[in-house]
Image (spheres, helix red, strand yellow):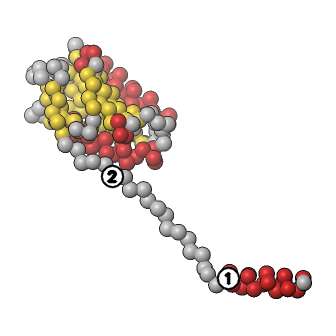
Amino acid sequence: MKKLIILFLIMIGFQSCGNETLPKPKPYLTLQYPKPNYITHNFNCPYSFEISNEAIVHLKDNCWLTIEYPQLKATIHITYRQVNNNLNEILSEVEKLTFKHTIKADVINAIPYENFDKNVYGKLYSVEGDVATNIQFRVTDSVKNVLAGALYFYTKPNYDSILPAVKYIEKDIIHLVETIEWENEI
């Protein structure tokens, strides 16, 4: 009986050796976001700009805004400040907020923006790493107005996981900056 069991186990062993196990290829997540259509928003504030129809805009006091992306669980918080001979102070405050992330950030890239025809000058900060806000920006006419914004997700920061959504919203932020119009021209 023992010989029969041993013989049976040996036969099973030989049969299982015939099929080679191949590693499975790595799967890649494909995220598809809707192509945005941009709409001009006038807020009865000293500025206007275009934003995606996929976003919901809420006007707050003092011409501050939130731009929500409910499907992505993200919000851009925008603050407005009027300049009263304190432009450098305001821009320094905005930059401090950005560089508070240097503790957790892997890289902070600053991309300048200038449009002399519209008097729009600014910087877009791309903050890579597990930080609270991966994109921040500031825009000014250098005389009367400063608009600053920061993108937040309603989730624990995990840069690799949210990167596709960050890049999607980054395009909207760039479009927002490129379409800013100051209402109280210089």
The spot of residue 25 in percent (x, y) is: 49, 68
* Mark with earlier residue (1, 2): 1
Numbered mark located on residue 100 in the image: none
Looking at the picture, which amino acid does disc 2 mark? Gln
- Secondary element at tag 1: loop
Q: Badge 2, how many Cα within 10 Å: few under 14, some, many 20+?
A: few
Q: Is residue 32 above or below residue 110?
A: below
Corner quadrant of residue 113: top left
Seen at 61% across and 81% down, the residue is 19
Looking at the picture, which amino acid does disc 1 mark? Cys
Which residue is tagged 1? Answer: 17
Q: Nearer the viewer, residue 2 or 77?
A: 2
Side (left or right) of 81 relative to 185: right
Q: Is residue 66 visible?
A: yes
Seen at 36% across and 44% down, the residue is 165
The spot of residue 58 in percent (x, y) is: 27, 25
Q: Is residue 126 visible?
A: no
Numbered mark located on residue 32 in the image: 2
The spot of residue 158 in percent (x, y) is: 48, 42
Q: Is residue 25 above or below residue 176?
A: below
The spot of residue 149 in percent (x, y) is: 31, 29
Corner quadrant of residue 65: top left
